[in-house]
């Protein structure tokens, strides 16, 4: 394929915020009186905040009113915001910056496609705001992954056809969203988990554009 744009998920692909999400969700679960494990947290990757809350509540077998759910989601987000305020460029995952700079030097535009409404805050904290040609976050979309909206909108803003876009994702829902958008997807993480991806890499360390074969 001819790559004309690359779109990146944020959490778990560009930065390691998964641990902050986990700590915030676990704190909420502790308050509600049940245990929330690392394994449980895998189910929340790439999922919107409210959908994540519903999964968490189902794990704890807890039923709440819509008003209480909204309150819990906000509580979790405030905890998460406290954690990400501590972030620096040291939280950028190894090799990501170098790979993105190679793409840009080659003339390939890059974008972020994330369900997180905290995307602008994180990019500012790690000093990468100006690096991306487009940033689509949770405040700009109405449908969560695996719906293709977040990536389709990114391609539309960049004026690039979906078939010429490559998405980098660490979550199953994200891989499905990329495919639903008509794009190729490179999974970042475990081949067993991300078997639906067109290619899987363990991370960006030492990755070069020439290594991508789709």
Image (tube, rainbow, N blue to C red):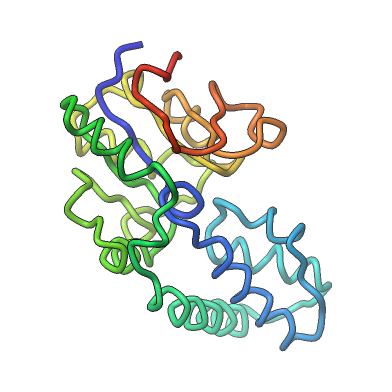
54 lies above or below 186: below
Could you say which quadrant of the image residue 116 lies in? bottom left
Q: Nearer the viewer, residue 145 or 106?
A: 106
Residue 187 is left or right of residue 92, and the answer is right
From the viewer's perspective, tell me whether residue 139 is left or right of residue 132.
right
Place of residue 186 in the rendered image (x, y in percent of width and height, measured from the top left): 49, 29
Q: Residue furthest bottom?
A: 31
Give the residue drawn at x 35%, y 55%.
137
Q: Nearer the viewer, residue 58 or 18?
A: 18
Residue 194 lies left or right of residue 140; in this view the side is right
Farthest residue in the top direction?
1
In percent of the image, x 55 and y 76: which residue is there?
Answer: 73
Quadrant where the N terminus sits is top left
Residue 84 placed where, x, y %? 42, 73
Question: Up-down: is 85 above or below 44?
Answer: below
The spot of residue 210 in percent (x, y) is 36, 17
Q: Quadrant of residue 115?
A: bottom left
Q: Quadrant of residue 155?
A: top left
How many dots with numbers?
A: 0
């Amino acid at each position: 394929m001819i790559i004309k744009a690359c779109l990146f998920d944020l959490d778990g692909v560009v930065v390691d915020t998964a641990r902050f999400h986990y700590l915030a969700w676990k704190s909420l679960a502790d308050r509600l009186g049940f245990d929330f494990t690392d394994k449980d947290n895998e189910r929340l990757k790439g999922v919107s905040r409210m959908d994540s809350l519903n999964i968490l509540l189902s794990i704890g077998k807890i039923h709440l009113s819509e008003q209480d759910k909204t309150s819990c989601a906000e509580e979790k987000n405030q905890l998460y915001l406290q954690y990400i305020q501590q972030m620096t460029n040291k939280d950028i995952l190894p090799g990501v910056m170098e790979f993105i700079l190679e793409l840009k030097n080659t003339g390939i535009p890059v974008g972020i496609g994330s369900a997180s409404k905290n995307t602008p805050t994180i990019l500012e904290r790690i000093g990468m705001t100006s690096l991306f040609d487009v940033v689509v976050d949770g405040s700009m979309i109405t449908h969560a992954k695996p719906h293709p909206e977040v990536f389709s909108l990114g391609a539309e803003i960049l004026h690039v056809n979906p078939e010429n876009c490559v998405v980098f994702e660490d979550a199953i829902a994200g891989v499905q969203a990329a495919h639903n958008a008509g794009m190729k997807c490179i999974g970042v993480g475990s081949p067993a988990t991300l078997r639906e991806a067109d290619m899987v890499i363990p991370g960006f360390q030492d990755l070069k554009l020439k290594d991508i074969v789709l």
